[in-house]
Image: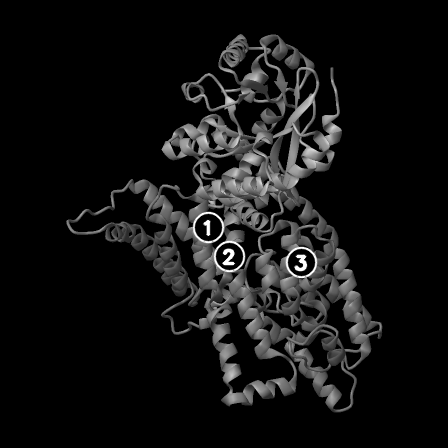
Amino acid sequence: MREYSSSEKELLNRYGNERVSVNFFNRISEIRLFQCIKSGLIMVIPIILIGCFALIFKSFPIEAYQQFITEFAGGFLRDLFTIIINATTGLFAIYLCCAISANYNRIFSNPTSTNSNYGSIITSLICFLIFSGVGSYKFTIDNFGVRGTFTAIVCALLASFLYHLIQSKSKGNFLIYTNGADGHFKSAINILIPCSVIVLLFALIMILLRAIFDISSINELLLLAFDKGFNNASCCLPSAILFMFFTHILWFFGIHGGNILQDISDQVFVPGQLINEALVKYGFEPTQVFSKTFFDSFALMGGCGATTCLILALLFFSKRKSNKYLAGFSVFPAIFNMNEPIVFGLPICFNPTLFIPFIITPIVFTLTTTFATYMGWVPYVSNPVEWTTPIFLSGYIATGSIAGTIMQAINLIIGFLIYLPFVKIFDRQKVKNAHIQMESLVMTLKRAEETNENINLLDQSTHLGVVARSLSEELRIMVRKHQFQIYYQPQFNAHGECIGAEALLRWEHPLYGFIYPPLIIQLAKEINILEDLECLIIQKVADDMHYILETMGDDFRVSVNFTPLATQSDKFNALLNGLVIQGSIIPKNVCIEVTEQIAISFNQATLEHFNWWKEAGFLLAIDDFSMGSTSIKYLQRNLFDQVKLDGAIVKDMLTNTRSEKIIASITSLSTELGFEVVAEYVENEDQKEMLVKLGCDFYQGWLYSPAVPLLKLKESASKNLI
């Protein structure tokens, strides 16, 4: 095994074993339980979006529209939207419970487990139903909607934890083997005991809570606790601030603050609205500042957290496309004060970076609007406003004055400025985390390469798997749109003359920069697009060949490295044959490089393709050549014109006499058998002088030139270092 370079050692120290030194916010966000919650929330984004759009179409605050959907076809449209709402956001907590449990399995469970995954999901779902009060006379279906978010999170995490704990302790003792029973039946029986134990525990807890507090669900328990806390509250500024504070604290932890504090709002703030309406009706001036309409119109623009301000900050200043896309999707619902897509999609819940602006922005709006009202700049809120009424219009209707609209605009600017620095911090953390995870993914692949371990990056259960899966989807798009690049690294002879170049795949990612090429190949292989990618590579080289030969000379040759798949692909060879017939490629100017991995599948079909390439006039090269038995077998067939030394041997030769002797043996064989030897990774003069001494006359590496874009090839090739 080769020695790690200093930079690689640094990465291993930082990211090996996935120990990452990050700031406070990152430490919290990297807690795996938070990852389960955030991943689960992201999974249910489609459900949220469908439900929110259906609710918008059902609640659009225009009287003529409402009359139309109510009367058209006997209320068909209203019924249609209601069904969609009830089936999506109406059951949101159920979907979330399953999603979080599934992510718990992915992050915490043994990847070799065959039956624990769906078992813990079933268990979590049953426990959620118990904690939601199913079967109680007080049960309400609303507990399955957004108001049941907190219960869903608790049940998914706790039930999944207990399930996996019991499974790990059982060591398979629950398996029942019966003649005639198939594997699915045995797996179902294996689930029975841990599921029963956990369900029994949750049921006992629920019975105990009912006996002590006379409640039917966890939501009701929370409601009872806050009712006690606000028992003596009055309609004043301190109560308004506390109301806003606790509403958003609850939302941050996935609890529907508006529903939990609904009774408090009805008792403390709704009367203020009724008093103002009555005073205005009888010709008096309104006297109550705080009311439900006050909060809806001025403190909660875009929903809890005044997230319209956050959406604007993301749209204008976020550098991450994913954030901009989500903000774009959230704009339309936010206009109607529905912010579930951004709250659960970004997410804001359990996101420590956005905790401060999410909490303080509505409080600041409450203070600014209260001050403006007391100063007489904005009229008292005296008109009821439907909560789905868009911003600016709601301010005008609520106050009966354009001053209400102006106040909303001022609050919007203030909120935008509050959120902006935190959005930038959030962006930086996302970028930093992304680079850390990418470097960790690359190091994982490098370790697998050095130990010849078969690895599937998409199946990784940690954050590495998330990064790999996301990157693979982008890779699929990149290949479909031909967005990759081909760079060329010049090759020189001992006289300092540039005699060729190796074509190298490059993908410049907008976030990660240039992706490690073997990672591209590995992901392409795992998502079954490697054949398409290699066909595109040879097509791209063919497109570049005319310019290369025109600027570098007719004898210039381009080496192209291909995987074992290409050696057996009829599609690849048909394309190569077509390019030769068209004259896009002149075989004598192209060297096809293959790796030792091909030995794994060195069958008759592979040999026939090799022979065709050779007969067509292509040069053949062995990449990463060493003195293993596989490499020697290649030479016995007299197919190859060139061997490229294993980079690890070249890097090691100045300090390891064994590597020096291996290179000397290979160059000696080259003289006797008639093939060229090319050394890669030539980075300094000492290496080059040693290679000359050992009889190697062709070089490639940073001493001469890095890989460069096509248009810079001539400039790099013109360097003569002799």
Q: Residues within 10 Å of mark 1 (few under 14, many from 20)?
A: many
Q: Nearer the viewer, mark 3 or mark 1?
A: 1
Residue corresponding to mark 1: 103
Of all residues, the one furthest to the bottom in this rendering is 282
Q: Quadrant of residue 170?
A: top left
Of all residues, the one furthest to the left in this rendering is 179
Q: Quadrant of residue 680?
A: top right
Q: Residue at x 76, y 30 (%)?
A: 715
Asked which secondary structure carries label 3, the reply is: helix
Can you say whether 589 is above or below 133 in the image? above
Q: How many marks?
A: 3
Disc 2 + disc 1, Cβ < 8 Å = yes
Observer able to see residue 462: no
Q: What is the quadrant of the C terminus in the image? A: top right
| Disc with the residue nearer the chain's start (3 vs 2) | 2
Is 635 left or right of 226, judged from the image as shown?
Answer: left
Asked which secondary structure carries label 2, the reply is: helix
Where is residue 574? Give x, y as percent: 48, 43
Asked which secondary structure carries label 1, the reply is: helix
* Residue nearest the viewer, comparing 39 with 288: 39
Can you say whether 128 is above or below 498 in the image? below
Q: Amino acid at mark 1?
A: Asn
Residue corresponding to mark 3: 359
Disc 3 + disc 2, Cβ < 8 Å = no
Disc 3 + disc 1, Cβ < 8 Å = no
